[in-house]
Image (cartoon, rainbow, N blue to C red):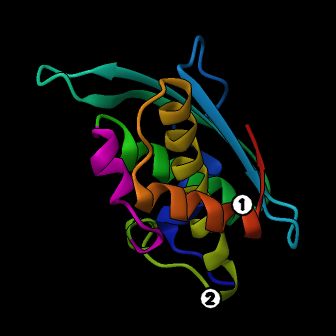
Amino acid sequence: MNYSSKLLDHFRNPRNFGPLKNPTITSQVGNPRCGDVMKLYLRINKNKDNQDFIKDISFETMGCAAAIATSSILTELAKSKTLKEALELNNQAIVDSLGGMPLPKIHCSLLAIEALVAAIYNFYKQENYPIPDSVQQRYNRINTTCKIEE
């Protein structure tokens, strides 16, 4: 399998790896077919416009090189974004940011996005915020394809 140099760099030198001390919220998703498991830790604060944003983010992933690299790049893409901006991220942004991925490994980029959506969903629920229909639909879809632990 041919991996880009950027993907290999994120695998060998993962960014934001390890548990985050005092996270606001976490999520954990797993792919029952391949066995990959991703756990995200988010610290969410208010910005100057009183919007919730991802002040800090880290991950722990048990999986292949692609799973670790997609988790790592996700943390870089999501950090400092408002929750609304973070929800606009998709797996193609991850693939593009890593310089491409072999087709059999694209599911790793989906799992990373699903972990982010699950964390934001958990935050909305924890804070008793109304959950937007689009987020609820995504969470429901994730819950049917992945194993989610809250």
Question: Which span is picked out in magenta?
Answer: 81-92
Q: Residue at x 46, y 56 (%)?
A: 135
Name the spot of residue 4 as percent of width and height, x first.
52, 74
Which circle marks residue 103 in the picture?
A: 2
User: Quick check: 148 left or right of 57?
Assistant: right
Please tell me whether residue 121 is drawn above or below residue 127 in the rendered image: below
Q: Is residue 16 visible?
A: no
Amino acid type, mark 1? Asn
Name the spot of residue 68 as percent of width and height, x first.
66, 53
User: Quick check: 14 left or right of 47?
Assistant: right
N-term-proximal mark, 1 vs 2: 2
Give the Cα distance between marks 1 and 2.
23 Å
Label 1 belongs to which residue?
A: 143
Assign a secondary structure to mark 2: helix
In the rendered image, the residue lying farthest to the left is: 49
State which quarter of the image contains the C terminus.
top right
Classed neighbour count for the residue bearing mark 2: other residues with Cα under 10 Å, few (<14), some (14–19), many (≥20): few
Q: Is residue 52 magenta?
A: no
* Occupied quadrant, residue 35: bottom right
Name the spot of residue 75 as percent of width and height, x first.
47, 43
In the rendered image, the residue lying farthest to the top is: 22
State which quarter of the image contains the N terminus.
bottom right
* Occupied quadrant, residue 139: bottom right
In this view, the residue in front, 115 or 13, is 115
Amino acid type, mark 2? Leu
Name the spot of residue 114 as percent of width and height, x first.
59, 58
